[in-house]
Amino acid sequence: MSMLTPPGMGGQYRITGDKYPRMRRPRRRGRLVFAVVASVAAIGLIGWGTLQLIDVFTGRGKTSATGAKAVCAKGASASSTAAARALPQPGRITVNVFNATPRGGLAKTTADELKKRGFQIGTVGNATKEYDKKVKGVGILLGPKASADTSLPVLGTQLANAERRTDARTNAAVDLILGDGFSSLTSKADADKALAELTNPDASPSPGTKAGKGC
C-alpha cells in the first residue's frame, strides 16, 4: 500500500504512485452571475411595485385615462360654450330702420316685416346725411360695441351680406340702414335656419363624423 493511500482505503480507492490528485474548489462563476441577475430583477420588481403603490394612493395611475377624458371634455365644453353663448332673442332687440336709397317707403315695409319676425321696432325713416345715398351694398348693420357679438349677428341673419359696424352710442338699439343693393330681407325660412345655426352651432355631427372620435 502506498503511503499516499489514506488508512482504511484500499481496493478501487487505493492510491498508488508518488503523486496525489489536486483538490480544486468548484467553480462558482455561473452561480455568481445567476445571483447578480436575480438581485437586479428583484430590485426592479420592488421599484415597480413601489411606483404602482404610489400611483394607487396618489391617483396618478389614472392620469392617462382621465387626462384624455379631460381633453375631450374641454373640447366639448368649448363647443358647448360657443353654442350656448348669450345671444339675445329677436324680441329683445330694438331695430331702427333707415332708408338710404331714393326709393320711397322702403324703410316702413322692411320694418313691418322685421316686426312680424319678432323684432322690436324703434325709429323708422330716411337715413341721416352721413349715409343717405352713400350705401352701395344691401345695407349696413350699426350698433354699440357690445352688439358686435350679440345683437348684430342676430339681426344679420335677416339680411345676408349686410356690412356690420359699431359706434360709440350708449343705448342698445341697432340700426338697419338699407342700401342701393337692397331688394328684400332674407326669406324667413333661410333666416330662421341661419338663426338656429347661430344660436346652436354644430348641434349635430356632420355625416361620417362619429361623436367622441379620438376620445
Image (cartoon, rainbow, N blue to C red):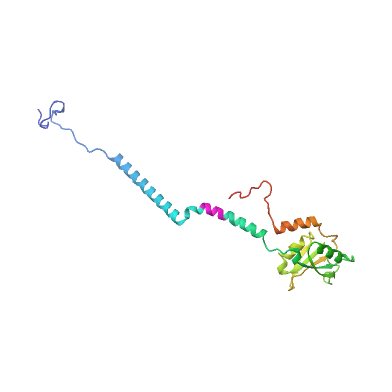
Q: Residue at x 71, y 59 (%)?
A: 199
Coordinates of residue 181 in the picture (x, y in percent): 84, 61
Q: What residue span does the magenta drawing correspond to?
A: 64-70
Q: Nearer the viewer, residue 139 or 20?
A: 139
Coordinates of residue 125 in the picture (x, y in percent): 85, 70
Per the picture, the main secondary structure of the magenta-coloured stretch is helix
Q: Nearer the viewer, residue 111 or 140?
A: 111
Q: Is residue 122 left or right of residue 63?
A: right
Q: Is residue 99 left or right of residue 195?
A: right
Image quadrant in which you'd find residue 182: bottom right
Number of marks = 0
Image quadrant in which you'd find residue 4: top left
Image quadrant in which you'd find residue 129: bottom right
Q: Residue at x 47, y 55 (%)?
A: 60
Residue 69 on the magenta segment: yes
Q: Residue at x 57, y 55 (%)?
A: 71
- Confirm whether residue 83 shows in the render: yes
